[in-house]
Image: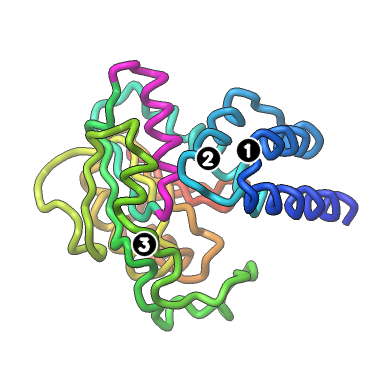
Amino acid sequence: MAQEAKVKEFEDRLGELHAKGMRGTMSRIFRKYTTALCEPDYTFDNLYLEGLFATGTDPRPLRRRDRFRLLLQQFERTLALDGRVAECGCFRGLSSYLLCSRLRSHDSRFDGTGHEIYDSFEGLSEPLPEDDAARAEEAVARSTRRGMFAHPLEAVRRALNAFPNISYGVGWIPEAFPQDSRSYRFVHVDVDLYQPTKASLEHFWPHLVPGGLMVCDDYNWPGAKRAVEEFAAASGAAFMVTPSNQAVFAKA
């Protein structure tokens, strides 16, 4: 309980600073938080703050920091592989900013080529009965509704302008997906709901190269959790769950 109170105190302070645009003070307070309550990772935290500022993302909830750190750790397992990188659902573009920045640190010439984003840019689709929060093992403290997390395409493009050759597939999933034989080394699925999560897993799994990974960000959302488990049962693909409730599929 004492730690929860400390996190709440940091969250309240950082929320105020974010609202006022006080980036310098926000950076200092964020680093105090990570030093006191997280496993230190100064390189990641510098990149994470850079991404928050570039995309205008609120630092709250603070547990998101560990989630994105784990995402990059999984991504680094695929850096030596061939294939594209796809992101299903991007909101403000923070995860794409982090993934692309990591690729640029691996290859200074990286300009977004081979990175694909698929999003309606109209927020969530209509939740289905499979998304009923009452079935969640872990409470989802949100009232999911159509249009949540909408963010304009042009705003995402501006946030990611350091990577001008990113490909944007605009539309609902799975209609937005390409219908060809391109291959992928890493796919990040962050669409929250049952239908687009299941469609994303089913579409990209056959196109994943050996050693490639699919990471579903939303195993703590009831619909996405059901989609992951149904896909795993139907395909025979095993998955592991990170401490931040991301489901990770690895292609043999």
54 left or right of 119? Answer: right
Can see residue 38?
Answer: no
Q: Is residue 103 magenta?
A: yes
The reply to whether dot 2 and dot 1 touch (C-beta < 8 Å) is yes
The reply to whether dot 1 and dot 3 touch (C-beta < 8 Å) is no
x and y, in percent, of residue 189 in the image: 38, 52
Q: Which mark's residue is nearer the viewer, 2 or 3?
A: 2
Q: Is residue 238 above or below residue 27?
A: below
155 left or right of 207? Answer: right
> Which quadrant of the figure has residue 5?
bottom right
Q: Which residue is mark 3?
A: 197
Element at label 2: helix
x and y, in percent, of residue 211 in the image: 34, 32
Q: Is residue 31 above or below residue 227?
A: above
Q: Earlier in the sequence, mark 2 or mark 1?
A: 1
Q: Residues within 10 Å of mark 1 (few under 14, many from 20)?
A: some
Q: Which residue is mark 2?
A: 53
What segment carries the magenta color? 91-109
127 left or right of 33? Answer: left
Q: Is residue 235 above or below residue 207?
A: below
Q: Is residue 246 magenta?
A: no
